Image (cartoon, helix red, strand yellow):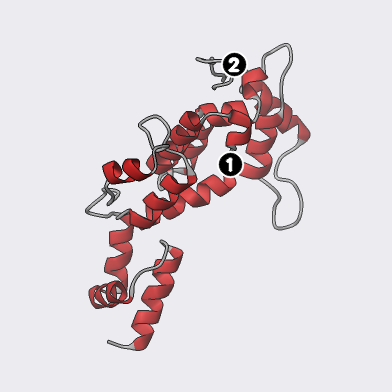
């Protein structure tokens, strides 16, 4: 097996996952590049590859309701059999981001991570629709405060500016201020009801 096959596979595994041990690189190089890409896109074993019971013994904050603590996320990313899926969750969370510091709810943060896991490798249109309904996002960008008599433009602006259309290669915006206003108006009523004060 050529060294450049191993190097190519190492590059792929760094980009489509979180790297791989040398013996895994050898096995994947033997299998071939196309077969490895296909396996990353459609893994046979979609389990997360970890013992949650063991994790919960050592990290008591990993209870059944709060599964968004950094240790849990990192452990799942490292141990998952679906490395590309985990990498895509991290990618989308870097773009479609919210923060516990505002939502103050790890329950909604966990639900958002699970939504990204479910939709992160599918249609971008479906992903934008799901993130628009996501309780953490609705709360984080104040869409829960937007109603017809007092429209809040935060979500409409973020959706057009950062999440989808943005600025073109020519440096010009791909949307107008009127688009932002109409987008924000269209999302009035997309809200959530607080089950517990301080918890979206």
Q: Quadrant of residue 24?
A: bottom left
Please tell me whether mark 1 or mark 2 is closer to you in this view: 1
Residue 80 in the image: x percent, y percent? 33, 53
Residue bearing the label numbered 2: 189
The answer to which of 155 and 46 lies nearer the viewer is 46
Q: Is residue 180 visible?
A: yes
Residue 132 versus residue 38 in the image, above or below: above
In the picture provided, is 100 more to the left or to the right than 76? right
| Numbered mark located on residue 97 in the image | 1
Residue beneath the point at 45% across and 35% down: 110
Q: Quadrant of residue 41?
A: bottom left
Residue beneath the point at 74% across and 57% down: 170
In the picture provided, is 132 more to the left or to the right than 50? right
Circle 2 Cα neighbour tier, 10 Å, few/some/many (<14 / 14–19 / ≥20)? some
The answer to which of 57 and 134 lies nearer the viewer is 57
Whole-number angstrom distance, CA of label 1 to CA of label 2: 21 Å
In the picture provided, is 166 more to the left or to the right than 7? right
In the displayed image of the protein, which residue is found farthest to the bottom? 2
């Amino acid at each position: 097996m050529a060294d450049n096959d191993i190097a190519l596979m190492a590059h792929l595994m760094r980009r489509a996952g979180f790297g791989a041990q040398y013996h895994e690189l050898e096995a994947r190089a033997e299998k071939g590049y196309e077969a490895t890409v296909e396996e990353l896109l459609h893994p046979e074993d979609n389990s997360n590859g970890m013992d949650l019971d063991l994790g919960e013994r050592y990290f008591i904050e990993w209870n059944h309701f709060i599964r968004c603590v950094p240790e849990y996320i990192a452990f799942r990313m490292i141990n998952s059999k679906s490395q590309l899926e985990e990498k895509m969750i991290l990618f989308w969370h870097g773009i479609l981001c919210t923060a516990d510091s505002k939502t103050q709810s790890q329950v909604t943060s966990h639900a958002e991570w699970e939504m990204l896991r479910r939709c992160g490798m599918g249609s971008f249109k479906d992903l934008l629709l799901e993130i628009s309904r996501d309780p953490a996002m609705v709360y984080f960008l104040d869409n829960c405060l937007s109603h017809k008599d007092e429209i809040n433009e935060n979500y409409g602006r973020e959706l057009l500016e950062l999440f989808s259309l943005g600025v073109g290669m020519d440096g010009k915006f791909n949307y107008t201020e009127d688009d932002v206003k109409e987008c924000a108006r269209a999302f009035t009523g997309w809200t959530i009801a607080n089950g517990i004060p301080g918890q979206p």
